[in-house]
Image (tube, coloured by chain):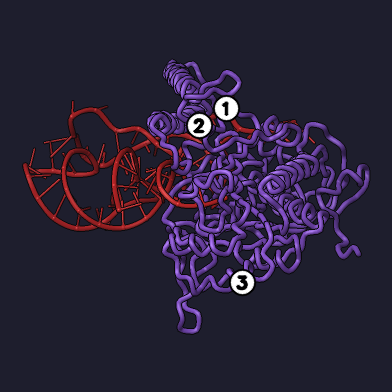
RNA sequence: UCCUCCUUAGCUCAGUUGGUUAGAGCAUUUGACUGUUAAUCAAAGGGUCGCUGGUUCAAGUCCAGCAGGGGGAGCCA
C-alpha cells in the first residue's frame, strides 16, 4: 500500500515531463540573480532543483533565498531529463514551502578531520558518501539473510548477557545482572552450536562486545556478527559454504548498489574477482613460508613486493612534494586571480594530507617487513602479516589448519596431525584482512574437557555445552562474519568507524 | 599497556633561529556579479594559541608534567 502522496527522488525517472511533489533537505545551494540551484536530498537520493524567478514567481523566489544548508522544505515542479545531473534528472520548481530553516550547518564541503566528523556523526550520516555506505550496509544485511533463508538456515539469536567468557582471551564488558556479575557477549558461538543440534542449520545475527582498548581503523567495541552453525558439516563443507556465501553477498551488492558504489568511487575489480574467481585455500604452513618470503606465489615474493611498494610510495611522495612547490611558485608569481590562488591553496592542503598518509605507511611497512621476516611457526597472523599475505592475491584467500595453541579450545583437532586444529580464516584483499573466522568444532567429549582444563577455563560454566557432546554428538562446523569488516571491504572505506551508524570504540560513547 | 605523531578562529591549516597589535582559505554576515556544479569581486565580524607549572627582559614558539586525539602493536571480526 502506498501511504505517501508525494514522490521520492528515486522515482523521478517515472515522472519525466510530469509534476511531482518532493519533500527533503537542502544539500547544497547556489544563488544567481534570477536563479537558485538547490540539490535536494530526501533519503532516497539527490536531485538538483532549479528555481527560476520567471517561472516560479517572485514570492517563491524570495522564500527560496532564505534557505540555508539542511533547511527542510517541500516543493512541486516539473521533471526534466538532464544527463549532466546526478541521477540524470532535474526538477523545475513551481511552488516551494519552507518547513524549517536550519541554523548554521557545521559540516561544510571542505575536508574535516575524522574526530570532528565522528563528534557530529548524527549529522555526518546525511552526507553523500555516508549515505552510500549505509545503503550498502543495508543491502549486505539483506543479502546475508536472503542467502541463509534460501538455503534453509533458521535465524535464532544467542543471548547478549552471558555468565562467562567464551574463549577466555579477550577482555569483556562487565555489567550488573541482578547483583551478579555478567558480561556482554563476545560471541554467540557456543549457543549457536546448541541451536544447530536442535535445528540443523542456523545463524545468529547480533551485536557483540569487546572491551579491548583498541585504537586502530579496524576495531570497534560494539559490532555486529553473523555466526552460522551447521550440524554434519566438516571443515571442507564449511569452507565451501563460506566461499559461496561471500560470493553471493558481493554479487547482490554489485547488482543492486551500482549508484552507491559509484558515489564511493569503488574500484570494482577485486569485488568482481571475489564473485568469479575461486578463493585460494592456503595451509597455515604455506602461509608462514609465504609471509617469511621463503615461498613465492605465481612468481611473486611477499618481501620483495612490499619493498617495491615502499619504493613506489617514496616516488609518489616526491612527486606530491614537487607538485606543492610548483603550486606555491604559481601562487607567488602574482599572475593568478584570487580565486585561482584559493583553489591552489586548497589543493596544497589536500596534497599535504595525502603525504601524511604516505608517511604513515612508510613508517609502518618497514616494521611489518621486519616482523614478517622473523615470523615463527605456531604464531597467530598479525594484521600486518595478513596484509603481506593478501597483497599477493587479487581475491579473498582462506587460510586453514592452524596451530592448536593460537586458536580457541572448541576447535576440532586434526586427526592426521594433532598439532593443528581445523580452523579457517578468510582474509579480504586490498589490505582489509580478516573478515571471517571459522572452524569445525571438537565433537569428542574427552578431548574437549582436556582442552578446557588445559586453557584453565572454569569447567562448571561449560557443563551445558558439554551436554551437546553427551547427547548425540555429531561433526559440525560454523563461522563468524564481522559485518562492519565486510562493509568496510565492499565499500572500500579506510575506517571501520564509517561502516556502522553510531560507532562505539575506546573513548567514544556519544553521539 | 607499549611505540609514534598531533593539539593555534566554527572547520582545515600557516606561524621561520623566542621579539611590538597572532595570519590564510573555507564557512558566516553585507553589497555587486553569475544556468550554476569545490576557481567571480569587495568589505565586516570571529582567537586568554589544550591545561598547569618552569626557563627568560620577553613564550604560540624552549623545558617538564597532565589531559584529549590520530596512527600502529597486542587482541580479534
Q: Secondary structure at mark 2?
A: helix
Chain letter for the residue marked with disc 1 in the picture: A
Residue B16, located in which quarter of the rendered image? top left
Residue corresponding to mark 3: A467
For disc 2, the neighbor class at 10 Å (few under 14, some 14 to 19, many from 20) is many
Residue A388's label in the rendered image is 2
Say which label, 3 or 1, has the lower sequence index. Answer: 1
Whole-number angstrom distance, CA of label 3 to CA of label 2: 42 Å
Taking B21 as reference, is B11 left or right?
Answer: right
Q: Nearer the viewer, mark 3 or mark 1?
A: 3
Position in image of residue A451 (x %, y %): 49, 60
Q: Secondary structure at mark 1?
A: loop
Q: Colour of chain A?
A: purple
Chain B colour is red
Q: Is residue A106 visible?
A: yes
Location of residue A244 in the rendering, given as x and y in whole percent from the top left corner: 75, 43
Q: Which residue position is annotated with label 1?
A: A392
Q: Residue at x 63, y 50 (%)?
A: A69
Neighbor class of circle 1 (other Cα within 10 Å; few <14, some 14-19, many 20+) is many
Residue A334 position in % (x across, y down): 45, 17
Relative horizontal placement of residue A240, taking residue A82 as reference (left or right): left
Quarter holding residue A86: top right
Instruction: Identify which residue is drawn at 77% across, 55% down.
Output: A148
Which residue appears at 44% of the width and 42% of the height? A379
Q: Can residue A49 be seen by looking at this rendering?
A: no
Closer-to-camera residue (A3/B21): A3
Say which of marks 3 and 2 sits in front. Answer: 3
Q: Which chain does the residue under circle 2 lie in? A: A
* Residue under disc 3 on the same chain as residue under disc 1: yes
Is A209 located above or below residue B20 in the figure? below
Please give left or right for residue A470 compared with residue B64 in the image: right
Determine the CA span between mark 1 and mark 2: 7 Å
Amino acid at each position: 500500500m502506498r501511504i505517501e502522496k508525494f514522490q521520492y527522488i528515486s522515482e523521478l525517472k517515472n515522472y519525466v515531463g510530469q509534476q511531482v511533489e518532493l519533500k527533503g533537505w537542502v544539500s547544497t545551494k547556489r544563488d544567481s540573480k534570477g536563479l537558485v540551484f538547490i540539490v535536494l536530498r530526501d533519503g532516497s537520493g539527490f536531485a538538483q532543483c532549479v528555481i527560476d524567478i520567471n517561472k516560479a514567481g517572485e514570492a517563491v523566489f524570495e522564500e527560496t533565498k532564505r534557505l540555508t544548508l539542511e533547511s527542510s522544505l517541500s516543493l512541486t515542479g516539473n521533471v526534466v531529463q538532464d544527463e549532466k545531473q546526478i541521477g540524470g534528472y532535474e526538477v523545475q520548481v513551481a511552488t516551494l514551502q519552507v518547513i524549517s530553516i536550519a541554523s548554521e550547518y557545521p559540516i561544510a564541503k571542505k575536508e574535516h578531520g575524522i574526530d570532528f566528523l565522528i563528534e557530529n556523526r548524527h549529522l555526518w550520516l546525511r552526507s553523500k558518501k555516508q549515505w552510500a555506505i549505509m545503503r550498502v550496509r543495508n543491502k549486505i544485511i539483506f543479502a546475508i539473510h536472503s542467502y541463509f533463508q534460501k538455503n534453509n538456515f533458521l535465524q535464532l539469536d544467542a543471548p547478549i548477557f552471558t555468565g562467562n567468557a567464551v574463549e577466555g582471551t579477550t577482555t569483556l564488558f562487565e555489567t550488573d545482572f541482578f547483583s551478579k556479575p555478567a558480561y556482554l557477549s563476545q560471541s554467540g558461538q557456543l549457543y549457536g552450536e546448541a541451536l544447530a543440534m536442535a535445528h540443523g542449520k542456523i545463524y545468529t545475527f547480533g551485536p557483540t562486545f569487546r572491551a579491548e582498548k583498541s585504537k586502530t581503523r579496524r576495531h570497534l567495541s560494539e559490532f555486529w556478527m553473523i555466526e552460522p552453525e551447521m550440524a554434519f558439516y566438516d571443515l571442507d563443507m564449511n569452507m565451501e559454504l563460506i566461499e559461496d556465501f561471500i560470493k553471493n553477498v558481493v554479487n547482490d551488492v554489485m547488482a543492486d548498489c551500482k549508484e552507491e558504489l559509484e558515489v564511493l568511487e569503488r574500484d570494482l575489480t577485486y569485488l568482481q574477482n571475489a564473485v568469479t574467481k575461486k578463493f585460494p585455500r592456503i595451509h597455515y604452513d604455506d602461509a608462514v613460508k609465504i609471509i617469511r618470503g621463503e615461498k613465492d606465489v605465481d612468481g611473486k615474493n611477499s618481501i620483495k613486493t612490499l619493498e617495491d611498494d615502499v619504493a613506489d610510495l617514496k616516488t609518489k611522495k616526491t612527486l606530491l612534494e614537487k607538485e606543492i612547490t610548483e603550486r606555491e611558485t604559481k601562487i607567488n608569481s602574482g599572475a593568478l586571480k584570487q580565486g585561482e590562488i584559493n583553489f591552489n591553496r586548497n589543493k596544497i592542503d589536500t596534497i599535504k594530507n595525502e603525504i601524511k598518509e604516505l608517511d604513515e605507511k612508510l613508517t609502518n611497512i618497514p616494521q611489518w617487513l621486519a616482523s614478517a621476516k622473523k615470523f615463527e611457526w605456531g604464531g597467530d597472523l598479525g594484521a600486518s602479516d595478513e596484509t603481506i599475505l593478501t597483497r599477493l592475491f587479487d581475491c579473498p584467500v582462506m587460510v586453514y589448519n592452524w596451530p592448536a595453541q593460537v586458536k580457541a579450545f572448541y576447535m576440532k583437532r586434526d586427526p592426521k596431525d594433532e598439532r593443528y586444529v581445523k580452523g579457517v580464516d578468510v582474509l579480504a584483499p586490498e589490505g582489509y584482512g580478516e573478515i571471517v573466522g571459522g572452524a569445525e568444532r571438537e565433537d569428542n567429549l574427552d578431548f574437549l574437557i582436556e582442552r578446557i582444563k588445559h586453557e584453565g577455563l572454569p569447567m562448571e560454566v561449560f557443563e551445558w555445552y558439554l551436554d551437546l557432546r553427551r547427547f548425540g554428538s555429531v561433526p559440525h562446523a560454523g563461522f563468524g562474519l564481522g559485518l562492519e569488516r565486510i562493509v568496510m571491504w565492499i565499500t572500500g572505506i579506510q575506517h571501520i568507524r564509517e561502516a556502522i551508524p553510531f560507532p562505539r570504540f575506546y573513548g567514544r560513547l556519544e553521539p
